[in-house]
Amino acid sequence: MGQTKSRHYAGIKWGLQNPSAIIVGEYQPRPKDELILVQEFYRQGVLLPEMAAAAKEMAEKYGVRKFFCDPNEPRFIERLRKERLWAVAVKDEELAGINLISERLQNTREGKPGQLVISRECKNLIFEFQRYHAPERDPNKPYRDKPVAVHNYALDALRFMVLGLHYEATPRVRWL
């Protein structure tokens, strides 16, 4: 049986006052199902032309097949498409994305297929992972599953990529 080729994908979180982030990952399909994060773009105050140029540069360097994007800025997605980049909005299901990333991290710890590996080149993503945490429990308030939203721009870009890959790899079932 032939070996499956890896492919590159990217996740994008738009920002202006907050940082914009592009995370590029090399995905190795099943049976390995491994996602290796190889490069990041992370900058505050980025205007649309600069963001599109950064995406195009990453697409050329890595052969990015598809950009999984923050759905809140359809105008940015259209701009990437005008640059002849395959960009799609990903339904923002925060808890589902967090769960998929957590599952990949657990698989990495256990040496199972479905791992997530982060290159040292992704310094801001590593910084955000190190500061990511759940809120303090207040016995007088209902528990919330959502993490504290501080320094999560690269993590959001990663979440869009993981969700996009998950939706793409999950076969659609047609019930009769």
Image (cartoon, grey):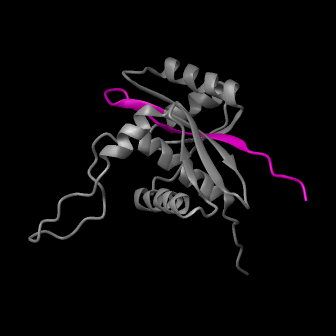
Q: Position of residue 29 (x, y in %)?
A: 72, 54
Residue 37 sits in quarter: top right
**Residue sitting farthest toward the left:** 140
Residue 2 part of the magenta segment: yes
Q: Position of residue 84 (x, y in %)?
A: 69, 28
Residue 107 appears left or right of 142: right
**Residue sitting farthest toward the bottom:** 176
Q: Quadrant of the N terminus?
A: bottom right
How many numbered badges does the structure rendering display?
0
Q: Looking at the picture, tell me which residue is in the foreground, 121 or 16.
A: 121
Residue 54 appears left or right of 21: right
Work out whether 103 lies above or below 5.
below
Q: Residue at x 64, y 53 (%)?
A: 34
**Residue sitting farthest toward the right:** 1
Q: Residue at x 66, y 64 (%)?
A: 170
Q: Position of residue 174 (x, y in %)?
A: 71, 73
Q: Looking at the picture, tell me which residue is in the foreground, 129 or 74.
A: 129
Q: Position of residue 168 (x, y in %)?
A: 66, 56
Residue 62 appears left or right of 132: right
Residue 8 part of the magenta segment: yes
Question: Which stretch appears magenta?
Answer: 1-21
